[in-house]
């Protein structure tokens, strides 16, 4: 039983080392691409903001056209 326990303890220690190595590699990879991800996030947010601005402007033009049509002006 003691031999089996020692074997299991060695396996556990090795598994813990492997988990730590995987975690370290994951952290390193995340850090390596952090700037790119942040840049992409900023670009996406700016793109969404511009799309919203275009939609607002288009809606403003639609309203102006409707108002002119209601006023009898041919557009």
Image (cartoon, helix red, strand yellow):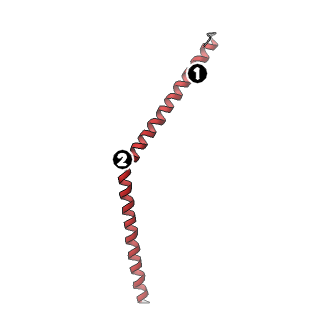
Q: Residues within 10 Å of mark 2 (few under 14, many from 20)?
A: few
Q: CA distance from mark 2 to mark 1?
A: 40 Å
Give the residue drawn at x 40%, y 80%. Answer: 9
Q: Identify whether 20 is placed above or below 64.
A: below
- Give the SS element for disc 1: helix
x and y percentages locating residue 19 in the rendered image: 40, 68
Q: Sort mark 1 into few (<14), some (14-19) or many (20+) by Cα contacts within 10 Å.
A: few
**Which residue carries the number 1 mark?**
62
Q: Position of residue 48 (x, y in %)?
A: 48, 36
> Position of 11 compared to 63: left or right?
left
Place of residue 74 in the rendered image (x, y in percent of width and height, measured from the top left): 62, 11
Quarter in which the N terminus is drawn: bottom left
- Earlier in the chain: of badge 2 and badge 1, it is 2
Rendered position, 45 above or below 16: above
The quarter of the displayed image where residue 58 is located: top right
Report which residue position mark 2 lands on: 35
Q: Residue furthest top?
A: 72
- Secondary structure of the residue carrying numbered label 2: helix
């Amino acid at each position: 039983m003691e031999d089996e326990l020692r074997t299991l303890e060695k396996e556990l220690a090795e598994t813990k080392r492997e988990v730590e190595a995987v975690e370290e590699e994951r952290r390193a990879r995340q850090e390596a691409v952090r700037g790119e991800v942040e840049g992409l996030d900023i670009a996406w947010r700016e793109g969404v903001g511009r799309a919203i601005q275009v939609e607002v402007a288009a809606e403003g033009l639609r309203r102006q056209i409707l108002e002119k049509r209601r006023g009898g002006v041919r557009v």
